[in-house]
Amino acid sequence: MDKNSTHNQEFKEELSSLTQKIPRRYAAILTEFCLSYRGAARSLDEADTNLVFFLKLLRKQFETPYTFEPYHKKVRTPIDYYRFGIEFLRPIVDLPHSKILGLEHLETIRGALKKKENVILLANHQIEADPQAIAILLETAAPEIADSIIYVAGERVVTDPLAIPFSMGCDLLCIYSKRYIDHPPEEKADKQLHNKKTMELMSRLLVEGGKIIYIAPSGGRDRRGTEGHIEVAPFDPSSIEMCHLMAKRAKTTTHFIPFALSTYDLLPPPETIQRELGETRNLTRTPIYIAFEKSFDMEHFPGSDLKDKEERRKARAHAIWAIVNKNHSRLLKTV
């Protein structure tokens, strides 16, 4: 692959101009990200075109940061950020070797949404670009479902300048995860109040019906274990219980669908969890995979007969996690 493209000079000028105006830490991360993207993309022309546009969007974020509401609806005009995110990710996805398992369950989801019933995807989470990865995989089989997904998102994707242009193209319910809510301590009360407001908005959406919401009950991304294998992070029983209670109170039929994805190699997260914003991002062109499962019975599952309420909730969370983990293992075997 040639080192230059028809947009190479424009890309260099945009990158040089921006890195001189932003904090040194972000300048280094941004430069590494751009070079990594160029190395992973199937075409340098495509890569440089996307990067020039991305850098212009990023310049706006450093000059006038975008503020996300607790319920953010994707920005489609005057710039279509949803389409931007998809087209940016496309050159590094090996689509011919990517795969969807459980396609038959898409009909259940489609039918439920048409009847104004709700669907909650109880999923694992691996990379910042999971929403764009899902949209790319579903754009032939179910583009309307991909476009309808509301993602429960942590603060990182709405506060890190490099992530914001992609987050602006998603429907988001913005929360502070348990992992970061105590940091810094003086902001804990405000963060808890924000989360309460977000959950109230989610409850209203479930009452309206016809919503599909993606939730990662682990509260974070999967990472490699001590033996080097990617492990599906454990699901938090209280997160699943909260979703279950909100769905019951909404009195609108809600389908809980275990959903597995394997996108890790595309944009691996840091090996360790870090509190500060600004993480190194290295990309690889690779296939990606997702798997849908049949609806999970939230009242009847292995351990549903346990007398202790907390043990029963743990059993439910583990049962859902086990399904996602099993399908994640199946996805890895397709490589």
Image: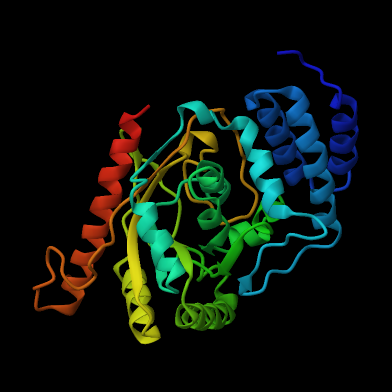
Quarter that holds the C terminus: top left
Quarter that holds the N terminus: top right
For the image, the number of numbered tags is 0
Question: How far across and down, in percent of the image, does residue 117 sit?
Answer: 41, 73
Taking the spot 50% from the left edge, 81% from the top edge, the residue there is 208
Q: Is residue 189 above or below residue 131?
A: below
Task: Specify the quadrant of the image occupied by residue 326.
Answer: top left
Q: Nearer the viewer, residue 171 or 101?
A: 101
Taking the spot 36% from the left edge, 70% from the top edge, the residue there is 239
Question: How far across and down, in percent of the image, does residue 243 sit?
Answer: 37, 74
Taking the spot 73% from the left edge, 45% from the top edge, the residue there is 25
Question: How far across and down, in percent of the image, does residue 9 sit?
Answer: 90, 26
Confirm whether residue 76 shows in the render. Answer: yes
Q: Nearer the viewer, residue 115 or 301?
A: 115
Q: Is residue 266 above or below residue 246?
A: above
Task: Specify the quadrant of the image occupied by residue 334.
Answer: top left
220 relative to 325 in the view: left or right: right
Q: Is residue 2 above or below residue 229?
A: above
Taking the spot 56% from the left edge, 29% from the top edge, the residue there is 284
294 relative to 168 in the view: left or right: left
Question: How far across and down, in percent of the image, does residue 133 sit?
Answer: 54, 44
**Which residue, as the protein is rendered here, is positioned at the far top?**
2
Confirm whether residue 229 shows in the render. Answer: no
